[in-house]
Amino acid sequence: MTGLPVTYHSGYSIAMPANHPFPMAKFHRLRAHHDATGLTAHLAFHQPDPIAWPDVQRVHSPAYAQAFRDGTTDQRAQRRTGFQWSPELVERTRLEVGGTLLALRLAVTHGLACNAAGGTHHAHAEFGSGYCLLNDLAIAAATVLDDGLARRILMVDLDVHQGDGTAAIFAHDPRVFTFSMHARDNFPARKQASDRDVPLARHVDDDGFMATLADELVALLERLQPDLVIYDAGVDVHYADRLGHLALTDRGLARRDRYVIETCRDRGIATAGVIGGGYDHDLDALAARHAILHREAAGVWFGTSVLD
Ligand SMILES: [Zn+2]
């Protein structure tokens, strides 16, 4: 049996100005971590193409897509994204979105797949925000729906921040149900209305998080009967993360990821995972945290534990 399908491109990480707060090198570091730990032997890597502009415009306005492509967004709009525009930034963003689209297609074919990036859920139809330039989750979802590869999608967004861009984009689209469980007192200050929001108080720990998640996820799966789940496995819920307010441990991340993927797999629902947010300055610690998604997904894929 070949390994868990994981989409990755060496172009996910690009050089950034010194001291930029976004840990752009983490995608390379995650890939290196897989080699160092031996997880690579359990994975099958697939290299994505950059997302096509017509696919971008399935969810983003033509005006924003063109301005982002051409670098004509103004300074204020760029500050809101946290990134200075560059042609390299456009290309790596297109690769990341292409990676999520490919992960969805692989998930539809094989039942389970992951991107080694993705989760840019703060990007809205008309603007980027909070380190999110294009909304990979929304673009990929709209593309597979339009292509007839899925009928009803459930977004399971467990990043510590609300999936506000995704919620707004699909507010009036019955094909996509947006579920966001996040820290209440966190970015974005002005929340959007997801189809289901579960705001958490500060310092929720592993057991508290899992108890709430178990109540929510099974009920949603039973009620909605989705044929595809897109899972944002942000690790900024970790107690050591700079931008989270929750208190999950490494073990809690593993329980969470295994639970989501196994619960969907048990019901025969195709599942695509993306790594989501994670902002530790210690890149090795951050890569190890993001690797938990791939390790747990590989465990479900092989029906055993991997690297335990
Ligand atoms: Zn986040």
Image (cartoon, rainbow, N blue to C red):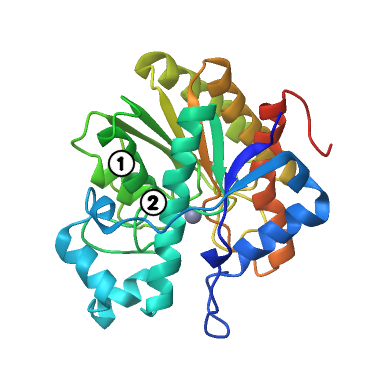
Does the image show residue 131?
no
Front in this rendered view, residue 305 or 184: 305
Residue furthest to the bottom in view is 18
Residue depicted at 71% across the width and 28% down the height: 1
Marks 2, 1: nearer the viewer? 1
Q: Is residue 217 above or below residue 280?
A: above
Of the residues shown, which amino acid type is indicated by label 2? Asp
What's the CA distance linking mark 2 and mark 1?
10 Å
In the drawing, what numbered circle is on residue 143? 1
- Could you tell me residue 211's position as x and y percent? 59, 26
Tell which circle, 2 or 1, labels the residue nearer the N-terminal end.
2
The disc at residue 136 is 2
Q: Is residue 9 left or right of residue 146?
A: right
Q: Are marks 2 and 1 in contact (CB under 8 Å)?
A: no
In the picture, measured across the screen, residue 236 lies left or right of residue 177, that is: right
| Residue 188 in view (yes/no) | yes
Q: Position of residue 141 (x, y in %)?
A: 34, 39
User: The residue under label 1 is which amino acid type?
Assistant: Thr
Q: State which quadrant residue 145 falls in.
A: top left
- In the displayed structure, 116 sits above or below 104; it is below
